[in-house]
Image: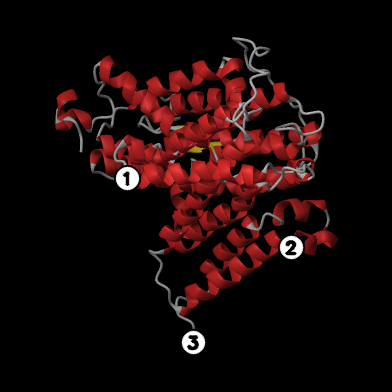
Amino acid sequence: MADTSIGTAEQLKDPNYTPVLSTAVPLGIQHVLAMFVSNITPAIIIAGVAGFGFGAPGADIPALIYMIQMSMLFAGVATLFQTIGMGPVGARLPIVQGTSFAFLPVMIPAVIGAGTAGMAGLMTGVILGGIFHFFLGFFIGRIRFALPPLVTGLIVLMIGLALIKVGIEYAAGGAGDFNKSKPTWGSLNNWMLAGVVIVVTLGVKFFMRGFMSIAAVLIGLLVGYLVALMTGGVSFGGVGNASWFALPSPFKFGFELNWPIVIGMCLMAVVSAIETVGDTSGITKGGAGREATNEEIRGATFADGLGTAIAGVFGGLPNTSFSQNVGLVAMTGVMSRHVVTIGALFLIAAGLVPKVGAVINTIPITVLGGGVIVMFGMVASAGVRMLADVDWNRRNMVIFAVSLSLGLGLQQVPEALSGLGTTAQILMTSGLLPAAIIAIVLNLALPEELPE
């Protein structure tokens, strides 16, 4: 319920209203805390699978810290695009942007084991995918008909299923052969730390209310971190060497045109754009009790794409709107975009201080694993919730069955495509893109009713 002591009911529904600073600053920080863990996790995962994070041979810890920095910095920049706006760019609503999980199933096979050469191709794909995403804003409303809950729910479910393996590997001791070869990988100690995070997260989620419930994963990670600290599982060796201030470096990982990655990022941009349309509508419904306007939806999509493209130039990953912050607006009842602007400024400030990234890098991988198991499971469950709106007649069951079977099957047996060349393998082995394409095509091509 909205707190009318900080403004009238009409003021709280107005995106242009600014509460007093003593209220606006804590509300802005609250938005940052709600999205913080989810925002930095993709960078840590990509650094790990690319071979320069968390104990990899010859690990490039400064590069990992840099990626964490860019996650914070460009989440803040992209959020400013949404809240302040720039011409047609930005919804001018309290939309929080952050690094997207949705792209991970495409990004992981693109860089796994490839080091900075793979990163160069990935970042080029992020840039061009962001530009493609930007241009989706001109006709986003016209393609929504092709993405009913059957399709979008399946896509979100597949994203969650594709990522759960990463969560289990992290909880066991880390992804990659270099981690799995360690004698401690899969040990009881590792699982105990991950278990602490999971248990605390569930306890806070179900037995606390308000912001505490929304920030349950963050609180679970903090408790797990404290346990690891008390048991000697945290090292601060890299914090002292990190500088206090650093500017982003253009083309940090190089530039390399890799068409499979570019195509994959462009296809996933469509999914991300639809997600942003849903979040924009959720903001206006939850905070102001109205539908989002076409101008707001276009502006939000433009900001999504522009934020992603600029992040890619400086070594950041794709950005999208964050659904947990949509829930926070509905919970507080404060629709002010300026509150979120304050949160964005905090993110930018943190992104310019490498010591913040170095401190984040001290989180043990098993502690992070407990958090991502919950987060990725929630992604999958969000897909299931979307599928609850589907009319499960025979037609829709066939579409779902074929799409899920092929998508999940290729994800589990990637070597099944070994004879199709590198391009097909990068695009198809995540399982996500084939499942999405099959579902979209079948939904458009099959008649509404199958013959008896």
Q: Nearer the viewer, residue 141 or 252?
A: 252
What residue do we see at 49% from left, 40% from top?
A: 137
State the scheme by which the image is colored: secondary structure
Q: What residue type is labelled 1?
A: Phe
Residue 396, x across and y down, in percent: 48, 73
**Residue 59 left/right relative to 431:** right
Q: In which quarter of the image is residue 86?
A: top left
Which marked residue is nearer to the observer: mark 2 or mark 1?
1
Residue 5, x across and y down, in percent: 15, 25
**Mark 1 = which residue?**
207
**Mark 2 = which residue?**
413
Location of residue 307 with respect to 207 vertically, above or below: above
Which marked residue is nearer to the observer: mark 2 or mark 3?
2
Q: How crowded is mark 3: few (under 14 residues within 10 Å), some or many (20 or more)?
A: few
**Residue 206 left/right relative to 412:** left
**Mark 3 = which residue?**
451
Res. 169 in view: yes
Res. 314 in view: no
Rendered-image quadrant of the N terminus: top left
Q: What residue type is labelled 3?
A: Pro
Dots 2 and 3: beta carbons under 8 Å?
A: no
What residue do we see at 50% from left, 15% from top?
A: 349
Q: Is mark 2 on a helix, strand or loop?
A: loop
Q: What element carries label 3?
A: loop
Q: What element carries label 1?
A: helix
First-in-chain label (2 vs 1): 1
Q: Residue reaching furthest bottom? A: 452
| Disc 2/disc 3 C-alpha distance (Å) | 34 Å
Q: How crowded is mark 2: few (under 14 residues within 10 Å), some or many (20 or more)?
A: few
Q: Nearer the viewer, residue 182 or 384?
A: 182
Q: Which amino acid does label 2 sit on?
A: Val
